[in-house]
Amino acid sequence: MSRERRLAYLSLETPRPGQASQTHIAEIIASLEACGWEVELFATTQGGASTRSSFLRRLLDYVRIQARLVRRLGDFDAVFIRSHFMALPLALLARWRKVPVVQEINGTPADIGVTYPALKPLSPVFSWLYRVQYRAASHLIAVTSGLADWAREFAGHDRVSTVSNGANTELFRPEGPTAGLEGRYVAFVGGLVAWHGIDTMLAALARPDWPQGVRLVIVGDGVKRGKLGSVPADGRLLWLGRLPYGDVPPVLRGALAALCVIEDQDGRSASGVAPLKLFEAMACGVPVIASDLPFQAEIVRQAAAGLVVPPADPAAIAAAVKVLAEAPDKASALGRNGADYVAREASWQQRGREIDRILSERAREAGR
């Protein structure tokens, strides 16, 4: 019997419960373990946009976790890095030690300037840090095809594959309990941040053509939470805050539709988006209302799983909600199409098999 393969998973973006990054990391680890990998997570505790840790504390955390992994590099057959500009030391040392490194890319270096505007002047430095890592990597995995095309040009090689997000189809499925919320509603699940279209959703809710008797239910938290207080207290908006992961599917199952109206703030979505919320809503059999951005719009159209609207367009969102509210049979058909698509092509088990193939090939090439 062959020995179990060992993988080190490095995340310098601190995984926190309730955030998409934590879900993504946990699901990939579980799916790779199901494929026969023994996975050990090396993650920081001070990083992330939601923390108030000082730069010095974050820097020390970056150094600490990479030093711990460097000491044990020989124990692993491969290293999987959730791409981060500060992972350069580990990426280069692993290459020097002939341990294959696979980098997972979830965005471009420009995203740093969007999340942290004060750091925009340092964009050339961040680009250099990423470029050196990507050129040295055994393989790059991008979450959208547009991002994969960007990575090929940026890194200067073709060792690039697309492996998108997915859904836990054991948890997110059409069958199961609903949350028992009164009346009809449209759901949004995710971080309350500008590029998720929070302001646009609220503007759509305030329009006279938003259908009567349909509420907007929001699950999540973030810097835009203060905007929710500007909505009149007339019952049209229900904010549930951040819920445990297992409590999200019942909210989705009971929804008329799910909003995935990401916006292209400062060009951060130009290479495409593949948000967890899209796949999870589809997996629950709920039609999605998605903004017309690369990759996610293609999936919605290909699967006939919902309606596509222009980004940052409150009128279009309100009109889409009205269409689905007035055509329940159409909404049900779109929801079934989405659930079928995810079960067939976008479960985390499927994603794990795709990543397993890449990791196994790179490990064999390195003689491990």
Image (spheres, grey):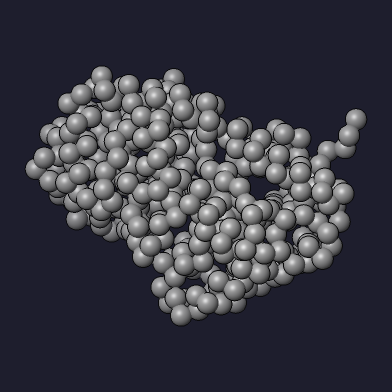
If the image is split into quadrants, where does the N terminus sit? top right
The residue located at (76%, 35%) in the rendering is 36
**Picture coordinates of residue 189 (x, y %)?**
38, 43
Residue 32 visible here: yes
Q: Is residue 274 above or below residue 352?
A: below
Q: Name the one closer to the observer, 159 or 345.
A: 159
**351 with respect to 280 (left or right):** right
Q: Is residue 176 above or below residue 27?
A: above
**Picture coordinates of residue 92 (x, y %)?**
75, 67
The residue located at (36%, 35%) in the rendering is 301
Q: Residue furthest left?
A: 208
The residue located at (40%, 40%) in the rendering is 298
Counting the numbered discs, the total is: 0
Q: Residue 130 sits in which quadrant?
A: bottom right
Q: Name the one closer to the observer, 135 or 113.
A: 135
Residue 187 visible here: no
**241 with respect to 206 (left or right):** right
Q: Residue 289 sits in which quadrant?
A: top left
**Picture coordinates of residue 60 (x, y %)?**
66, 72
**Picture coordinates of residue 11 (x, y %)?**
63, 57
The residue located at (22%, 37%) in the rendering is 320
Q: Residue furthest right?
A: 1
